[in-house]
Image (spheres, rainbow, N blue to C red):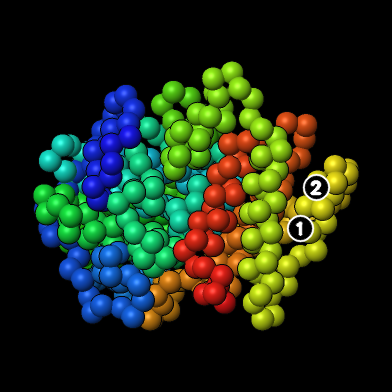
Amino acid sequence: MVPPTGPLPPFNSDIPPRQAQVVPASGAPPTPAAPPASPASAAGPPLPPGVVASGVGATAAGAAAGARSSAPDPLLQSASQLLYELMHASRVYGCVDWCVGVFKTPTGAQTVLVSSEGAGYIPAGVFVPRSARLLFADPGLGSSFHARWFGWVNPAQTMLAYAAACTGHDPNIELWAVAVSTDHGGSVVPARDAGVRHFEDCSLLVSPITADAAPAPLDETRMHRLETVDRAEYVRLTEGAGIAPDRSQAWSTTQVAVRTAVTRASSLLGFSVPPVIRHVASALDLREAVSDAQWAELEVVRLNAALDSASQRPGRMLGDEGPSPYARAHHNLARAAELLAQWRGDTPEYAEIAYTARQIMTEAELWPEKAAG
C-alpha cells in the first residue's frame, strides 16, 4: 500500500481502479470555532460554524423544512441516491443515520460516507460501493479526531470536521455536496450554514426505494464492511489462498473483545451487564449448546444496547465534546452481543467476527483503561 500522507490520500491506490474520487467545492470549509478543551485539535473545528448548539436542534429544523439546495447538481443526486441505499439496507438496524459527502479534489470527485454509530460502524448486510470510502477509515486521521467524533448524533457535523481536516491538508479540496438522513438525529442544516453548495435532507418516509425491495447485494461493485477498513484481512478470511480461517483464532479474538466490552462496562457505576452475555460466552467456550431461548434473549440485549447507544450519542447538548463512558459502554455491549450471535450455527462468520471485534477494540484503544470511566 502507498503510505498515507493525510486526509483524502490517493483513492484506493493499493488496488485496481474502482471508480471516482472525492472533489472539493467552492465555499470555504468551516473555519475552526474556539478551540475545545478536548483532544480535538487535529480533528478540525469542534463544531463547525452554523451548527446549532445542539445537534438535535439542527435536526429538528432540518427535518421540518426538508432542507435542500435549489440548484440541481449531479453529484448531489448521486450522494442522495447512495444515502437512500444505505438507509434502506440498514433500516433493520433501526437507529443509525448516514451522511454522504462528495468532495472535489485536483484528481476528481470522491465520495465519502459516515454513520452516526461509533467509529462509522456499518451494520451487517450493508455493502458499500467500491466507488466510495469510509470516513473513519482514512489513515490520515489521528486518534483525537476519532475520539472527538465517535458516535456523533448528526453525521453531517462529522463530515464538516473531516472536510476542515482535508482542506487544512490541501486547500484545493472542497466539500461540494452533502446528503444526510434525518430519522435519528441527522440534519444537513450545519452543512448549509457552513456554505456547502449542494445539500439535501433525506428520510425513509420519502425514500424512492420501496420497503419490500431487496437491499444492494455483495457483488463485484460492493465491499463487505470488513473490507472498508482492512482489505487484506477481508481477503485472508474469505479467499485465503486456499487456507481455511483458523476457528480457534477467531474464537480467541471473540473472547478478548467480549471480555473487553464486559470489563469496561462493569467498571462504570450503576451500569449493569446483562447476564446472558456471560452465559452465552461461557457456553460457547465450553462447546456447550446454547438454547434458542438464550439466543433470543441475546438478540433482545443487542437491540436494547443499540437503542441505548443511539439515545446517548454526543452532539445533543451544548458543550458536548465526545461520547460519555456510558454511551461507549452501550456501543460495546451492542457489538459484544452481535459478536456472540455470529457463532450461532456450524460455520462461524469469520469476516463478520473480525469486523465486529474490531469495533470494540477500537473504542478501547481510543480510551485506554485508565480513562475508560
Q: Position of residue 260 (x, y in %)?
A: 64, 60
Q: Residue at x 45, y 39 (%)?
A: 230
Q: Residue at x 15, y 37 (%)?
A: 107
Q: Position of residue 114 (x, y in %)?
A: 40, 51
Q: Give me the C-alpha separation between circle 1 and circle 2.
A: 12 Å
On-image quarter of the C terminus: bottom right
Q: Position of residue 295 (x, y in %)?
A: 80, 48
Q: Earlier in the sequence, mark 1 or mark 2?
A: 1
Q: Nearer the viewer, residue 228 or 240?
A: 240
Vertical order, 110 against 185 (above or below): above
On-image quarter of the N terminus: top left
Type of the residue with mark 1: Ile
Q: Which label sits in the foreground, 1 or 2?
A: 2
Tell me if 275 is positioned left or right of 89 in this view: right
Tell me if 292 is positioned left or right of 187 in this view: right
* Residue, disc 2: 285
- The label number, if any, that marks residue 337 in the structure image: none
Bin the neighbour count of mark 1 within 10 Å (Cα to Cα): few under 14, some 14-19, many 20 and up: many
Q: Residue at x 59, y 18 (%)?
A: 242
Instruction: Tell me the quarter of the picture where residue 275 sits.
Output: bottom right
Instruction: Tell me the quarter of the picture where residue 265 sits.
Output: bottom right
Type of the residue with mark 2: Asp
Tell me if 349 is positioned left or right of 37 in this view: right
Q: Nearer the viewer, residue 8 or 184?
A: 8
Find numbered disc 1 in the image and state the secondary structure of the residue it sits on: helix
Q: Position of residue 299 (x, y in %)?
A: 73, 52
Vertical order, 370 against 27 (above or below): below
* Residue, disc 1: 277
